[in-house]
Amino acid sequence: METKKIDKEVIDELFVTIPTGTVDMRDDRTKDAWSVDIDCFELSKFPITQELYRAITDENPSTFNGDKLPVETVSWIEAVNFCNRLSESLGKDKCYKIDLATEKVTLNARANGFRLPTEAEWQYACQTRTKGNRYGELNEIAWFKDNSNNRTQEVGQKKPNEWGLYDMLGNVWEWCSDIYDETVYGTYRVFRGGGWCDQERSVMATTRRRSHPFSFKIDDLGFRIATNSKK
């Protein structure tokens, strides 16, 4: 499959730098709690749009169509493939090694290409060290059941958080790199953030959900991308 070319400056402008810190995690199902140290990294300001997804893959799987709408109805493995193809298009090392026969995916955490954020990185970036469930009043920062008109909305319309990240909550859930709980759910991967059809109680920085990485896709689930810090 031919690798698409894209302007490096367009991609560079998409990212903001997330500083080092620590995030407190919890799982409401198991009642477990743990802390994770976060190294400085780069995270995209917005969920990946249909315009960018199509520019790299020449495809658009989305249910709701629009260049500036977040891409959705995309599986975890499709999000990972996007990351690899974007890395290739800019001459960077691919972060993921994919064996489709065994459905085994290996992450090279030191690669200089693009990847999905870990869920600890995602939560830390969403909370901006506040440790709260939200970074503002929900109607001002997120598209959810009460205000979404039953569909996705163009990215970047709501207020960003302190670090300049938009739509971290609401609009679409976002795939993360991590396996949720291998002993219980096998290869199921994590997604975070809440979507356009969720009730207020579900749209929080700490809400964790999971599903199958190769087969699960739905119209309120997309992704944003990360890369290791250039500093």
Image (spheres, rainbow, N blue to C red):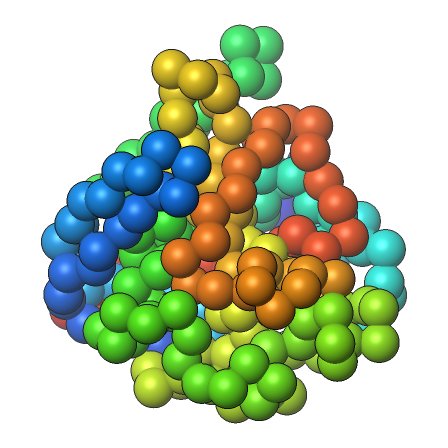
* Horizontal and vertical percent position of residue 226: 39, 58
* Horizontal and vertical percent position of residue 11: 48, 71
Relative to 156, is 84 on the left or the right? left
Picture layout, residue 189 above or below residue 71: above
Return the residue found at the far top.
102
Q: Is residue 110 visible to the viewer in this orientation of the structure?
A: yes
Res 38 → quadrant:
bottom left
* Horizontal and vertical percent position of residue 209: 52, 43
Count every numbered label the image shows and give the total: 0
Residue that appears at 39% across and 20% down: 182
Picture layout, residue 86 above or below residue 52: above
Picture layout, residue 83 above or below residue 18: above
* Horizontal and vertical percent position of residue 72: 72, 54
As rendered, which of 147 and 55 lies closer to the eye? 147
As rendered, which of 156 and 190 lies closer to the eye? 190
Residue that appears at 49% across and 34% down: 189
Relative to 149, is 180 on the left or the right? left
| Quadrant for the N terminus in the image | top right
Residue that appears at 48% across and 64% down: 204
Residue that appears at 71% across and 56% down: 220
Q: Is residue 94 visible to the viewer in this orientation of the structure?
A: no
Relative to 164, is 63 on the left or the right? right
Picture layout, residue 24 above or below residue 138: above
As rendered, which of 109 and 3 lies closer to the eye? 109
| Quadrant for the C terminus in the image | bottom left
